Amino acid sequence: MSQLIEIGSVRTLLFASTGPLLASPADANDFIGEAWSVGADLLAIPVERLGPDVLNLRTRIGGEIFQKFANYRLRCALVGDIAAALDASGALRDFVRETNEGSALWFVPDVDQLRARLATETAA
């Protein structure tokens, strides 16, 4: 079950680690709809909810999904350990580093790290 939490001034929808996968751009509609229904600004999606090809940059599935979130002005944080995927792909490492420098998409190891990033952002 998803949980709406306020971190600073950011309404964050924290998705449960179990549930339907985010595996295609069409699946993103369900996540967007749920976020809109509670007025969330940021989606915190556990990596366990990602389909098998989302972090494979060659498929372009992740890019399409994340672009859809951006088009609907929803920020996204992928929460969890993606070390194995990073070890397997230099391109993914570069992508994660670049997106973590921005504000639309973050990869964080846990919710505490997400809270810390949002707290620093709110303080700035």
Image (cartoon, rainbow, N blue to C red):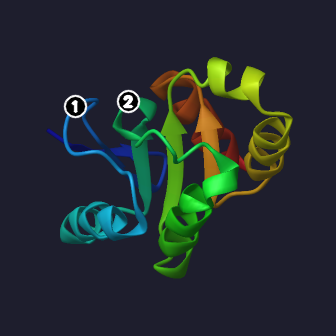
Indicate the secondary structure of the residue bearing disc 1: loop
Instruction: Look at mark 1 in the image and give the residue it sits on.
Output: 18
Q: How many marks?
A: 2
Give the amino acid at mark 2.
Glu
- Seen at 51% across and 40% down, the residue is 78
Left or right of 107, for residue 13: left
Is disc 2 placed on a helix, strand or loop? helix
Quadrant where the image shows the N terminus: top left
Q: Position of residue 50 (x, y in %)?
A: 41, 41
Q: Quadrant of residue 35?
A: bottom left
* Amino acid residing under circle 1: Thr
Is residue 22 visible in the rendered image? The answer is yes
> Front-most of 35 and 11?
35
Residue position marked by numbered label 2 in the rendering: 48
* Image coordinates for residue 49, horizontal then vertical, percent: 35, 38
Left or right: residue 14 versus residue 87 is left
Is 33 left, or right, of 84 in this rendering?
left
| Mark sitting earlier along the chain (2/1) | 1
